[in-house]
Image: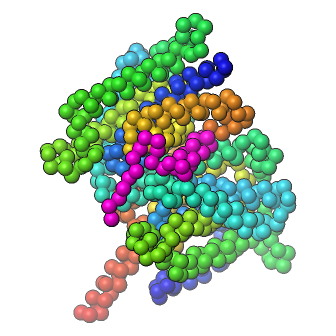
Amino acid sequence: MELFVHQVLAGLATGAIYALMALAVVMIYQAIGHLNFAQGEMAMVSTFIAWQVIQWGQPYWVAFTAAIVLSFLGGVAIERVLFRPLHNAPALSSLVAFIALFGILNSLAGFIWDFDIKTFPTPFGSKPLFGESLIGTHQAGMIGVTVAMLALLYLFFRGTRLGLAMRAAAANPESARLVGIRVGWMRALGWGMAAAVGAVAGMLIAPVVFLEPNMMLGVLMYGFAGAVLGGLTSPGGAVLGGFAVGVIENLVGAFIPYVGRELKLTIALLLIVAVLMVRPSGVFGRQIVTRV
Amino acid sequence: MTFPARAVTAVAVVAALPAPLLVSSFVTFQLTLVMVYGLAILGLNLLTGFNGQFSLGHGAFYGLGAYAAAVLIDRWEVPYFCTLPVAGALCFAVGFLFGMPALRLQGIYLALATFALAAAMPQILKFSPLEPLTGGVQGIVIAKPDPPLWLPLDADQWLYYFTLAVLLLMCAGAANLVRSRTGRAIMAIRDDPIAAAAMGINTALYKTLTFGVSALYTGVAGALGAIAVQFVAPDSFTFLLSISLLVGLVIGGVGSIPGSLVGGAFVLFVPNVAEAVSTGLAGAIYGAIMLLVIFVMPTGAAGFARIALARLATARHNRVKS
């Protein structure tokens, strides 16, 4: 029983990261109708930026903030330069652009910071929380930061004019433009925020998976699995889905021999395929109806 | 096939025939690999170019075909030429089954599922309970096939001709498939799935079958690749391989059978150049070229050649008139 509770808590901690990645993916999906296959690599580059700032002797939270701000600007820039011209292009062009971005970021990170595995500091320490408890301080920190971040995003989208404008631009671009919302810039803001959310996810998971150019591939896969499970049309659902796949991953790893340890990515693959077979719109998503 | 296309094909085949007798055995080996990658890209092209479906996971089918050939040769001493049909059939079955859930949905979901497949493939090949079969992380080493005794060829030259024969056979098959009633159905689904369904085409079945055939082509290419390289290991079949095939497809031209071979040459030679500049930079160069192509040359090399030929023909026409 104790093992079970321990695994569920550990699963919630990594699930928090998957939830953030799933949220970032869904934010871009809502804005442009494509899955951002480079989301993980963007988060990886953000984490390397934070690492570099720490190497230059700045305190952790300065690096943390700098990485978030730079990622936001980077995300906006990617949308403006790369994806705005492709807005009406065929789907294959967008897909190729995402894969190109994946290749460029992965390869450049390896070129600048090389492929050696690096440690990334945690501001929370790694002692158990409250003496004999079941969860470490870093894991608690991962959950805490994620929940705070989600609350802030919720307040932003529900409570501010800008958040409302962004939701309107995603829900109905034509009507939003007619009431004077600059839809293109809302889309760019969405990209920037997705990049910032991904940066937080990257910096929180880096102490666990260690920093290297390929570190986010598995995390992104579970993020996708969470997004598909919760529903690509539902940000809240994607977050819950992310937490759920984190718990599933840990339980499978703890209780099924061989499979959990060696086939982590395959579990994500099976989750994705299973959801697509049973309920393609996800648990909380709505069915997309196309008018002919 | 129109007259210039037929003439170009004939010239290409005639030029390919004496090539291994004129160049060194290493260049022969490289040309063999160009054909292998070209065949793999042709498989992806059948899916993406003619049926409008996206796959980010064809590297996984290439790996599956390669492992099928290697395991058959290594464990059961099957002759190498018998492994190709087996690899093809296996990939067809896996592709068909894998495509079934994903293909009923929008293209984006198929891209997602195949992305996951490509990322998971090295882990599946390393999976320790399968190690007696797959050799685990070390992979499998196989011997290069001997040429028939009555031919005055060395092993590399023989493998070149063997690959060329398989390639021509499969290109002819693809060209015939595309021209047939089935091919028109496949392309109708690409152009407008709803209209195609209204015309009575079973879109789900045709999409799944196309995915199976596409996986078959790439799997046969994988088997040929394993025989040519004489070695398979899990880390040869990572996501980067799937990216390479996609790059080759985009460079060569989506929906062009000869373009696939141009793509094959590209993915074989350009990474070597990139690695010469700096190790690990292949991804960045691939990415930059992909962006360049979709912004500047969206129809790929084949489209570029088509436009150039059309311009040339118009110019000649005008000259004759004046």
Image quarter of residue B82: bottom right
Taking the view exactly as shown, the residue that stands out farthest to the bottom is B321
State the image coordinates of residue B291 (x, y, percent, origin top left).
Answer: 39, 54
Viewer-nearest residue: A119 or B46: B46
- Is B164 rendered above or below residue B289? below
Q: Is residue A106 visible?
A: no
Going 61% across and 24% down the picture, which residue do you hit?
A7
Residue A28 x %, y %: 36, 43
Q: Does residue A145 belong to the magenta stretch?
A: no
Q: Residue at x 31, y 39 (%)?
A: A190
Residue displayed at 54% across by 69% down: B206
Q: Is residue A285 left or right of residue A277?
A: left
Range drawn in magenta = A265-292
**Closest to the observer, B32 or B74:** B74
A249 or B1, which lies in front?
Answer: A249
Left or right, B103 with respect to B135, comes to left
Number of dots carrying numbers: 0
